[in-house]
Amino acid sequence: MKIRSVDELVSFLDSELAWRKRELTTFKLEVEACKRDHLRKLWLRAAVPILYAHWEGYIKLAAQAYLAYVASKGLRYCDLQFNFVAVARLGDIQQAARTKQAEKHVQLVESFIRFDTEQARIPTEGIIDTASNLNSEVLSNVLCTIGLPYDEYWRAKAVKIDRSLLGLRNGIAHGERREVTLDEYRELHELVIDCLEYMKRMVEAYCENRWYLRGSALDKRMA
């Protein structure tokens, strides 16, 4: 993925969100138009994995797009927020973590200081991992990876994400006879759409305000 400008990033996020919302809206209309009870039950069960797919798919792509944008800037380690330094030096960190040799640990710390003014090479492939199970804990890790906050908005949605969206999706995906009511489905539909829109606003705000830079405004909460 190559994204080199704010406009490219915004266009990508808009396009990805638009087709997902169209598909989810179409699915919702079909569910609500269905009058036969046994068919509606089938539609409602099928709707939950679709909702989850768009939840995981968009969050992952939005995170990857933001990471790709920051990587394209060619910034120095000392210019970047620490999360991006961690991504850029992930291989060295993991290697040092596998050994108990203090010398290797010291060398890693020394390298952070010695090469602080060099251009960071931020990898973008295989960094964002949703573990095919994007619950609130995994989401928090994804956001931390790209330097976005797991804020009050996400904490307020955690129970619905974990128990309702993930709970139903995992049960259905594993072959359980989980029935979904129309009210439950409508609530999940609104939850997913709202979360995707919020993720989009977060990424755009961090990009436009250059909050990926070290020393940028400390208060990065969304209005």
Image (tube, grey):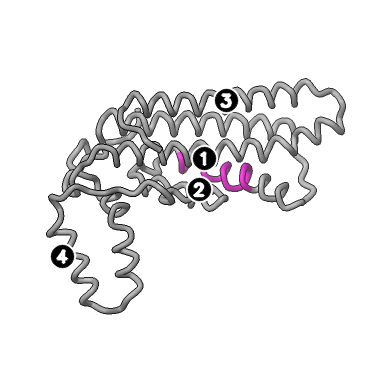
Query: The residue tagged with tag 4: helix, strand or loop?
Result: helix
| Residue wearing tag 4 | 110
Work out whether mark 1 precedes mark 3 in sequence or the reverse, and give the earlier one.
3
Check disc 3 and give the amino acid type.
Lys
Q: Confirm whether residue 141 shows in the render.
A: no
Q: CA distance from mark 1 to mark 3?
A: 19 Å
What x and y, as percent, mark residue 124? 37, 46
In this figure, which residue is indicated by the disc labeled 2?
136
Query: Which residue is disc 3 drawn over?
Result: 21
Marked residue nearer the N-terminal end (3 or 4): 3
The answer to whether mark 2 and mark 1 are in CB contact below 8 A is: yes
* Residue 158 lies within the magenta run: yes
Q: Are marks 4 and 1 in contact (CB under 8 Å)?
A: no
Under mark 2, the amino acid is Ser
Q: Which residues are magenta?
A: 154-166
Q: Mark 1 falls on what kind of element?
A: helix
